[in-house]
Image (cartoon, coloured by chain):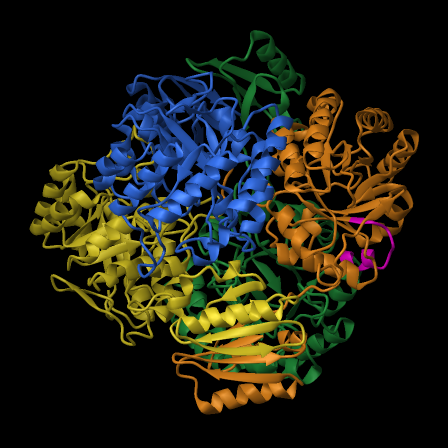
Chain colours: A green, B orange, C blue, D yellow
Amino acid sequence: MIIVLKPDASEEQIRHMVEKVKGLGLSVHLSKGAERSIIGAIGDEALLTSIPLETFPGVEKVMPILKPYKLVSREFQQENTVIDVKGVKIGGNEIQVIAGPCSIENAKNVLEVAMEVKKSGATILRGGAFKPRTSPYDFQGLGAEGLEYLKAAGKEAQLPVITEIMDPRDLELICENADIIQVGARNMQNFMLLKEIGKTDKPVLLKRGLCATIKEFLMSAEYIASQGNRKIILCERGIRTYDTETRNTLDLSAVPVIKSLSHLPVVVDPSHAVGKWSLVAAMSKAAIAAGADGLMIEVHANPEEALCDGAQSLKPRKFDLLMKELKRIANAVDRDI
Amino acid sequence: MIIVLKPDASEEQIRHMVEKVKGLGLSVHLSKGAERSIIGAIGDEALLTSIPLETFPGVEKVMPILKPYKLVSREFQQENTVIDVKGVKIGGNEIQVIAGPCSIENAKNVLEVAMEVKKSGATILRGGAFKPRTSPYDFQGLGAEGLEYLKAAGKEAQLPVITEIMDPRDLELICENADIIQVGARNMQNFMLLKEIGKTDKPVLLKRGLCATIKEFLMSAEYIASQGNRKIILCERGIRTYDTETRNTLDLSAVPVIKSLSHLPVVVDPSHAVGKWSLVAAMSKAAIAAGADGLMIEVHANPEEALCDGAQSLKPRKFDLLMKELKRIANAVDRDI
Amino acid sequence: MIIVLKPDASEEQIRHMVEKVKGLGLSVHLSKGAERSIIGAIGDEALLTSIPLETFPGVEKVMPILKPYKLVSREFQQENTVIDVKGVKIGGNEIQVIAGPCSIENAKNVLEVAMEVKKSGATILRGGAFKPRTSPYDFQGLGAEGLEYLKAAGKEAQLPVITEIMDPRDLELICENADIIQVGARNMQNFMLLKEIGKTDKPVLLKRGLCATIKEFLMSAEYIASQGNRKIILCERGIRTYDTETRNTLDLSAVPVIKSLSHLPVVVDPSHAVGKWSLVAAMSKAAIAAGADGLMIEVHANPEEALCDGAQSLKPRKFDLLMKELKRIANAVDRDI
Amino acid sequence: MIIVLKPDASEEQIRHMVEKVKGLGLSVHLSKGAERSIIGAIGDEALLTSIPLETFPGVEKVMPILKPYKLVSREFQQENTVIDVKGVKIGGNEIQVIAGPCSIENAKNVLEVAMEVKKSGATILRGGAFKPRTSPYDFQGLGAEGLEYLKAAGKEAQLPVITEIMDPRDLELICENADIIQVGARNMQNFMLLKEIGKTDKPVLLKRGLCATIKEFLMSAEYIASQGNRKIILCERGIRTYDTETRNTLDLSAVPVIKSLSHLPVVVDPSHAVGKWSLVAAMSKAAIAAGADGLMIEVHANPEEALCDGAQSLKPRKFDLLMKELKRIANAVDRDI
């Protein structure tokens, strides 16, 4: 931790600060510059973060040196984490494609899509039973009934399934029916939910919050990891910016950035990021070229009739074409799909 | 709802669209312009929002006309909502000041601050027992124990109390101990939590999410109202922007904007928005000048020792001076404090 | 300058870095921590900013300690700069109100508005002759002819006048006709223009760019100051964020932040920030409560007929009422208007 | 243009509005809905944009239907624009790579880099002579002398050259020495400069402003086109967001979005967007996968010694490796490079 002092900080104030830092068991380097003095606190930085050093008289600013996350950092673990979900390996050389409808509407539809995407090469089936909708008057998902349909479709198509959790009280039910738990962007800092998930050993796909920094994203993963569950898949799904041509702005440079900071696998959800099916293909290819370990793509047999997010869903035929294009890109970066 | 068609939309596509809209029981105005044709759908717009009209062939864009929220809108209720919390009226002519520590640390501290802020003119006591912290390694609050201390301090100082909820499983406990439930910025779109709170009749203070639009903010209030609870106080607390001089950017124009769109009271939390105590006074004054119905200010007897957000907390003496300045501003806009 | 080294930085890399810094004439503090080593470079930080220290092998990040601006900083000059424009003092205890039409449309209109705003208490007349419009097909201003009308109106109403410059080739013409040169948000980083203005001794009002940080804003002021012209007025006029309820988001906390960092006067333009006349009054009052030294408000006799930005213009009668309200707020913060 | 009226708009107000629109020569569709009435104005929308319809009593909001740009739109010209710069075709099937140093430092360095990047497959040489620097104390470029070095290096390496313009007074000089004029992000809305460039017939590369919407970006291109020059290359170079891990956020979905809206070629500058050389390769590959027509990459023989932006520059050897990887990606999307 570096503590920069104001130009007019008094000797008394500097002494007070130095004693405070030493009192916590850290050692101190005091360096008096021409314009400002600086205190370097050496030792366990975490001890200092709990103290509002900025409030001390004479302090101008405080700059942390170390990263606030540990278990999920590349420094803690050099090699990539590879998560095995019923034989599907996420984070290895093979790129995994998660596909399916935004929300589960009935048993028949989800099964049909499952069979289609399986045939095209998807390896995991997605489908929402509990839907976070901006409006209380929109379709909120089928709940427990939807989970059953999803589980059955996954079994029939021989695909592991993933579904979103919104309430810690649903955790047991979801763990029974799904192979991967999804935490949506709106719940990325629902810390109570993260802690509960951290106590299970289910793989979890954590979506980046709409305006979360990469540091905050990794801190939320750390919440899960700190409770024991290390099977975490990170998902970039677009951030909120000022532009309105796309629903959100897909931050693809987050992929190489996160992979340099963390050992966890990173997948990309282009469907939610752009919000228009016509842009999904281009951004899926770009995501793989940027180094993503997987994709999450919405597919619906009849987007016009979709109860949720139809505008961004691909029809099975378009998805099939896309998978062929993705194979070429994957090969161009020496990966399988 | 206005549906703008592409310049090259075919007659067949237009007919398909028109039939779809009519099939929902709405009437249609088709207007053929020089460059584009437009369909105006007249009737219950909510019926249309559930359909992904953008996916229909020939459609360029879809523009809703009506506001998606109802119960919380100024159109639904012309006069201001005034919420009575043990005799403290929020939303009326009197400006209410909510003050207290960020987190409850022990029985003694919260009582001391309660007595101080009461003396200076605060009318509601704040204090966090469950704390949403970015890091799992930071102080997470005293939980149920903290609630007891808060309740006791409020009773002693004769101030109603407010505290934050993070988990629907804590709702009963918090309702027993607090007079107002606070929903923090990170949970603004925790829809499960909002629904549960909507079923109680406790006053609730809903903070704007870090990157929530005003429309989304009002939609979250609508979630609560749709379940029956209309005692909702909205709180602007800063939004995330690119600038880093302040923790967040306090969006004060949100105050008059929200008051034009909704009948609900609006308070401002300058402490969290700016993150530095030295800026709290200026922004508190500005908030009242902009038309806020109240303020939420962090006060701590010894910010250097605060376990949370000490950097933005005022000492009781500074808070007392500020209250005197606020009185002058309130008078200048014909309000009491 | 603090240089944080990677955990695996080699001795050789550290030595290379230390030599580089010493070679520039700075002294070095090397501090070896448990997890990372840190190099503190003491001396003239400006020497180091020209070197891409981040590219050196073994370097993790580089953190500047000093502020990159000098002449405009509060450290360089403790007391507030007060700029005298024909007897109107900007930056002193008196709050100055700059008012007038967005663009000059003809001699009669600008004179009428000038007389009206003068009567209501405005002290400077604004009016655009060269207009930066997003579309090449929109009204671009009357140019030199407009400047004449503005000058004449100012003379008649006995108000100094301000107008915007967009091209260094217009500098002489504008200096002859106006008392203050305005640099618009889009030209905040038009460095060639800033340098030219810096060589004159005309007062200049510099608007904050739409997505400029406060640091960049002050650096642009430094460009002007570095050429010799210190008569700089800073103007906060809203920044671009994700919300769309207002044209831009007025960043009022920038007022106290800038006043703590710089000795220059700060004025606020609520009209451009919010883009709706109905919000201008609330934000004008808030700006003064936040500590602004002045306001810049658009007034038009007949906004419906305005050739530019009519939506945000006040009618003279509304402006007159507002001035009365502003007087009360100014008094509440011990200032005159 | 759709004009949405307030629920309480009077008959008189509606009549006033309708007459105004008709008076401009447009025809009117008045549609009275259950909750709101709507006026559809049919005809030349440009006539209406100059009128502040929002200020009319009874009006709630105004929604334009048509796009504000014409000459640069895909509707105006269906087929892609291909720009020929001394035989190098930008916008065709072949992807062009613009490479070179951020700033020209001396004759020798720029020539060395030119020969290197030519050998690796770059087809255009970049180099800055006039540098827009945030600080007035940073290296500002060699000016006219630098242009000579650039021209000589391009001639020797048989590469067309591109350089940035910052001041309309330099236009003639730059036209004599460069094959493509670059307008930087900070000058994207320097409308005077755009107009002057529009009067030449030099190819121009226009960079997206740091917080420009795609619509504004296309409007700036329209400024150039409206003066006669249609040889415009658009360049996405990252936008400003709240995240700080990268210098800016590369908005790759802008590539397919712009290509759907406009016929102009789109290139991507990953170097400035991310600001770190280690991320340039991943984002270059992603840009091509997303459909970019070209790349602009900074290359410097010795980034440690670079006078500008060394942190984001590739060494020639790394650039050479990258070109080989890009070839594979280009082939995977059926393009040459």
Image location (x, y in percent) of residue B50: 64, 75
Q: Is residue A335 left or right of residue D102?
A: right
Residue at position x 69%, y 60% in the image: B219
Magenta range is: B193-204
The quadrant where residue D118 appears? bottom left
Image location (x, y in percent) of residue D264: 28, 66
Query: In this rendering, is residue B332 above or below C109?
Result: above
Residue at position x 72%, y 69% in the image: A137
The quadrant where residue D105 appears? top left
Residue B195 within the magenta-colored segment of the rendering: yes
Query: In this rendering, is residue A305 above or below D295?
Result: below
Image location (x, y in percent) of residue A17: 61, 16
Image location (x, y in percent) of residue D168: 20, 46
Q: Is residue C217 left or right of residue C326?
A: left
In this view, the residue in front, D107 or B191, is B191
Residue A149 within the magenta-colored segment of the rendering: no
Q: Is residue A32 left or right of residue B325?
A: left
Q: Does the rendering let one see residue C212?
A: no
In this view, the residue in front, C297 or C196, is C297
